[in-house]
Amino acid sequence: MGASGIGKSTLLHILGTLDRPDSGELRYSGKDVLQLDDIQLARFRNRTIGFVFQFHHLLPEFTALENAMMPALISGMEKRPAMEAAKAILVRVGLESRLEHRAGELSGGEQQRVALARALVMQPDILLADEPTGNLDRKNSDLIHALLMELNQEMGMALVVVTHNPALAALVSRRVTIMNGQLHELDEPATLATSLTI
């Protein structure tokens, strides 16, 4: 959490290897992934990290099923297993009856659930969510919040969320903010900074 412009989304983009920092390391399982070349890094990102953003970024000409299976196809998975994986996660997020609907035929909440399914189709170790309910009404926000927490437990993945929404922040096990270029626990005195400097 934290004020607008403080660097929350930038930090998330660096954690997700979408942006490279000017200096430093980004270690995953003991390896600095920033040492990977662009192709290796894209492969790592595809297989390890799922992303959900405030705007769903669905391809409008594709169905919910086609949108959700895209990361699997990009990874080189055959079409049939990719479709099965996408269908399973779409059913899990409550969209069994909307598989063949194009993005424009879905409500805002449904579109965000497709985006969540797309982020999870590769069963990533890490899910990064940047204001995942920023464009949704209260009912749909609550639904996405519940899904994030349930799927976090079911899939055993790490979940990192950037949010201004206190209801979502209240559900997570640890809350931090950025102050003076360092992460600080929100529930602890500001003097307890982590070792991360950005």
Image: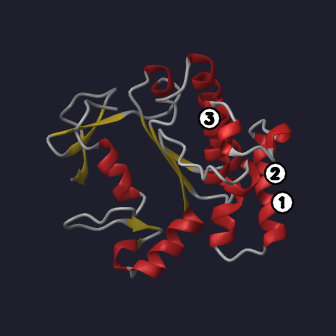
Residue type marked 1: Glu
Identify the element where label 3 is drawn: helix
- Residue 32 visible in the shown view: no
Residue type marked 3: Met
The answer for how far apart the CA atoms under marks 2 and 3 are is 18 Å
Tell me which residue sits at (82%, 68%) in the image.
81
Tell me which residue sits at (34%, 65%) in the image.
26
Position of 120 with respect to 57 (left or right) is right
Q: Residues within 10 Å of mark 1 (few under 14, many from 20)?
A: some
* The one of 149 and 143 positioned closer to us in this rendering: 143
Identify the element where label 1 is drawn: helix
Q: Position of residue 147 (x, y in %)?
A: 66, 34
Q: Residue at label 2? A: 88
On the rendered image, what quadrant is the N terminus found in? top left
Q: Quadrant of residue 14?
A: bottom left
Q: Residue at label 3? A: 149
Q: Which mark's residue is nearer the viewer, 3 or 1?
A: 1
Position of 66 with respect to 194 (left or right) is right
Q: Residue at label 1? A: 84
Q: How is the image coloured?
A: secondary structure
Position of 166 with respect to 11 (left or right) is right
* The one of 166 and 107 positioned closer to us in this rendering: 107
